[in-house]
Every structure is written in C-alpha cells, then in structure tokens.
C-alpha cells in the first residue's frame, strides 16, 4: 500500500476527538489537537485527559510525553502546519430540533484559511445528509482551491460507545465516503492504522453521512418500540423484560431494552437530522418522529409513577422529597447530555417536590445545573420516594434494607423486583406488574 506523510490536526478534543487524536498519535502520526476550551488544552498538554474514559488517561499521558500529541486553541496555525484536518466538533440540535452546525462551520472556516493544495479534510461530526457537499465544501473552497481537484474531502462517522470507546475505535468497522476515490482511500489509510475492523468505502459523502443517522435512528426506533411495549405491559400486568427476553429467542427478533428515556449526544439527536431533511423534501418521517415522541415521553411517565407511588403512600408530590439514583444518560458514564433525568427533575420540581440526586460519576455542579441537590447515596435512599434512573453498576448492590423511603421506583432491569416487594415501602418497576 502507498505510504503517506500525513501530519494531522484534529478539531474538537471531546469524547470522540481526544481518543481519536490519541490513538492516531499512538500509531506515530504527528497530531495537533485543536480545541476552543483553553482549560482542556492546558490539561491535555500536561498529559491529563479531561475526558473520563477507561484507558484514555494513560494513552494521553504517553502520547503527550512522547511528543506525538500536542494541543492548541490556535486552529489556523494547526491547519497551516498539517496536511490532514479532521473535524470532530459538537453538532447538537437547537430548541426547534434543527441541527446546529455552527461548530462545524466555524472549524471549517478556520481550516479554509490554512488549507493548502492537496490537503485532506475529514469530517467525523455527525451531520444531516448533504452537509459536506452543501455546507462544508463551499466554506473550504473559500481557500481558492477546488474540492476534488485541488484538495480532498472525506466523511467518516464515529460509532464508538462511551465507556468502551478505545476498544470500539480500534475494532469497529469504519464507513468512509469521499468526494472522489482518492479522498476515500487516503482517509482509509489513516483509519486502517487504528482499527482492526473492516473499512467500508461507500459511494460518496452523503451515503456515509446517512449511514450514521440510519444506525442511530434504527436504535432509537427500536427502543421506542420497547418503551411502548413497557407502557402496555405495565398496564396489562406483564413483565416486559421477561417477555422481551423470550421474544428475542426468535432468530430474527432483536427488541432493545426499555428504560426511562433515551439520552446522550447521539440517539436523542441524530433522528432529528433525518426528519429535518426529509420534511424539507416533503417526506413527513412519521415513524422517526413518533419514536422520538415515545422516548421523550418516558421521563414524564416516570414522573407519573412517582406521583402514583407517593399517592399510595398517602403523600403528594408537592412537599415530598424525591431522590434520583443516577443522572448520567446511561450506566457507568459521566455524560449527562440530553439525559432523561433533566425532564424528570423538571416535572417533579414543577409539581413542588424537593429533588435530590446521587451519581457516582457525574460531578455535583452538573447535578445542580440539572436542578437537583447533589447528595450521598444514603441520603437519596431516605427521600420520600427514590427513583433508580441510571443503570450504574453500583446500584446493582442495592438491598431492600438500605431503602428508607416510603416508595421506591425502579426504571432499569438492575435489581430483582421480587426481592424488593413487600419490604415495607411501595415498590414500582417500569414495565412490570404492580
Ligand atoms: N460522544 C459520542 O458518543 C459520539 C459518538 C459518535 C459520534 N459522535 C459525534 O461526534 C461529534 C463530537 O461529539 P463529542 O461527543 O466528542 O462532543 P464533545 O462536546 O465531547 O467534544 C467536542 C469538542 O469540540 C470543541 N469545539 C467546539 N467548537 C470547536 C471549534 N470550532 N474548534 C475546535 N474545537 C471546538 C469543544 O470545546 C469540545 O471539547 C458530534 O458530532 C457527535 O454527534 C459522538
């Protein structure tokens, strides 16, 4: 295979950018990491990872010490010094559920000012279809160079799972689409160095953009189905978890796990990127929108469970204390972006509850920003009602005798409900009888 002398600049050193930069630096690429967060840039240059992710601390320390990774807030200098620019900046949705591409626009604008002939720009941020063609390339061409002929552009989505990011980045298959074949093969050369997974070259940029959105929309829709089944089973006194487990023995059935809602920076956002472009083209994307609706309803359903449980305990939400166990959007991570804890806490506060929350991974400032009082586990278990919301491993060790609340609500298949029934407090479990 042809060898290239690539010097990389990675724009965005967050949950995805920093592991990517570190793995590439570990393979011997000179990497400049660019981030607008000066505090994180300082930490990284001291060899400290600001991102909590297994294995990342030592990897960052190692590649910084060896001089393969350095960080800077100066994107223009980094773009001038490098011949491959990778963009991994955030792409949230705004209050109207439309994509906010301002960070991609800003990073590409900086890159365009430092772009040289024959450079390669790779977009990794999750974006709506046609973002590369209609937004990224026109900005990059402000450099005076023509995309395809004079510089190369590729899109490759990231699919690594938080808490297992390094393993997945080095083992998952990698989808790559380019403006032309040379763009894809140059990008493939880079990612082949870090992944044992298959490299799948798709026809063009927009197909690669769509693949990522399809994957997450499939998962969001599947969870919505599981959540809808949970709501139905709860009413019919059927244990949804047992039913799904049995149904999944069917060789062509794979129903996901119900829960209190879908959070994180991917599943709860990416489907809207498809809806946005579909609606613009006259397709209502009904199934995708309904799935979002079902999943966004789940925290409100949990709030209703709190209300019912407190009523059975002779109390109202108003004036009661509610303890939330876990505000991260999923188990064993510190990430609380788009967490179902947000709408649940808001619902309870609006109804007059005093909401406390415990989370072994999320810092107290973030818990406060979500509207809850950060408390120790023992204190959360003393509230009038306690809700197990996030499937952190720590909560598997809960025992009925630890619970001093009048009501306990379980929204995850973390504990055996049979152990918690009839133990002197009201017990309710999402998607299960009772
Ligand atoms: N976190 C995930 O699990 C995951 C998985 C797959 C894909 N993605 C996608 O990857 C992209 C990045 O996500 P993330 O979770 O790493 O985000 P993040 O918020 O953790 O990190 C993004 C970083 O980019 C920096 N940044 C913002 N604007 C910048 C700019 N103009 N120039 C340089 N740096 C800038 C921020 O300061 C931040 O440190 C998003 O599009 C996301 O959808 C994320």
Image (cartoon, rainbow, N blue to C red):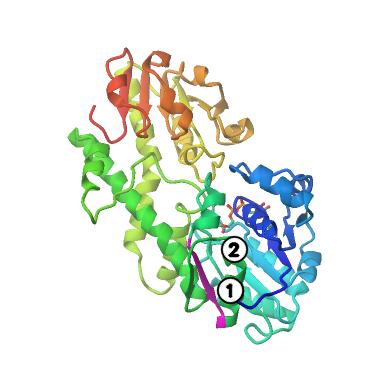
Q: Give coordinates of residue 59: x percent, y percent.
A: 67, 48
Q: Which residue is mark 1?
A: 154
In the displayed image of the protein, which residue is found farthest to the front? 1
- Sequence-first tag of 1 and 2: 2
Q: Nearer the viewer, residue 57 or 325?
A: 57
Q: Give coordinates of residue 34: x percent, y percent.
A: 73, 58
Q: CA distance from mark 1 to mark 2?
A: 17 Å
Q: Quarter holding the C terminus?
A: top left
- Residue 349's tag is none
Q: Which residue is mark 2?
A: 101
Asked if residue 174 is among those painted magenta in the image, a careful observer would answer yes
Asked if residue 119 is among those painted magenta in the image, a careful observer would answer no
Q: Secondary structure at mark 2?
A: loop
The relative height of residue 14 versus residue 177 in the rendered view (above or below) is above
Q: Give coordinates of residue 383: x percent, y percent.
A: 46, 18
In the displayed image of the protein, which residue is found farthest to the bottom? 149
Magenta stretch bounds: 173-181
Q: Quadrant of residue 144?
A: bottom right
């Amino acid at each position: 295979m042809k060898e290239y002398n690539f010097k990389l600049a990675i724009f965005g050193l967050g949950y995805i950018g920093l592991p990517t930069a570190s793995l590439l630096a570990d393979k011997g690429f000179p990497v400049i990491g660019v981030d607008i967060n000066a505090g994180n840039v300082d930490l990284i240059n001291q060899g400290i990872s600001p991102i909590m992710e297994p294995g990342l601390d030592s990897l960052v320390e190692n590649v910084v010490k060896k001089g393969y990774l350095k960080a800077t807030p100066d994107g223009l200098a980094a773009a001038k010094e490098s011949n491959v620019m990778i963009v991994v900046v955030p792409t949230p949705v705004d209050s109207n559920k439309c994509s906010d591409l301002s960070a991609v626009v800003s990073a590409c604008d900086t890159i365009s000012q430092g772009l040289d002939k024959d450079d390669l720009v790779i977009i990794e941020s999750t974006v709506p279809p046609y973002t590369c063609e209609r937004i990224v390339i026109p900005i990059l061409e402000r450099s005076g160079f023509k995309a395809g002929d004079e510089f190369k552009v590729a899109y490759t989505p990231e699919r690594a799972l938080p808490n297992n990011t390094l393993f997945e980045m080095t083992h998952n298959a990698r989808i790559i689409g380019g403006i032309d074949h040379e763009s894809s093969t140059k990008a493939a050369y880079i990612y082949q160095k870090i992944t044992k997974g298959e490299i799948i070259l798709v026809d063009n940029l927009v197909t690669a953009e769509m693949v990522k959105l399809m994957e997450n929309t499939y998962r969001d829709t599947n969870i919505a189905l599981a959540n809808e089944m949970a709501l139905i089973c709860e009413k019919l006194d059927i244990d949804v978890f047992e039913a799904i487990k049995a149904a999944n023995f069917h060789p062509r059935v794979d129903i996901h796990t119900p829960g209190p809602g879908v959070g994180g920076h991917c599943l709860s956002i990416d489907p809207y990127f498809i809806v946005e472009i579909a609606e613009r083209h006259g397709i209502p994307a009904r199934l995708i929108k309904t799935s979002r609706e079902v999943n966004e309803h789940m925290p409100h359903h949990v709030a209703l469970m709190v209300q019912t449980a407190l009523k059975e305990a002779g109390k109202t939400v108003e004036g009661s204390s509610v303890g939330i166990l876990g505000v991260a959007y999923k188990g064993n991570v510190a990430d609380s972006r788009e967490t179902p804890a947000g709408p649940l806490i808001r619902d309870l506060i609006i109804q007059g509850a005093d909401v406390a929350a415990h989370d072994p991974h999320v810092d107290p400032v973030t818990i406060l920003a979500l509207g809850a009082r950060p408390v120790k586990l023992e204190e959360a278990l003393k509230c009038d009602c306690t809700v197990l919301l996030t499937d952190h491993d720590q909560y598997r060790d809960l025992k009925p005798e630890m619970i001093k609340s009048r009501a306990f609500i379980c929204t995850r298949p973390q504990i055996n409900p049979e152990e918690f029934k009839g133990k002197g407090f009201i017990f309710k479990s999402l998607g299960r009888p009772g």
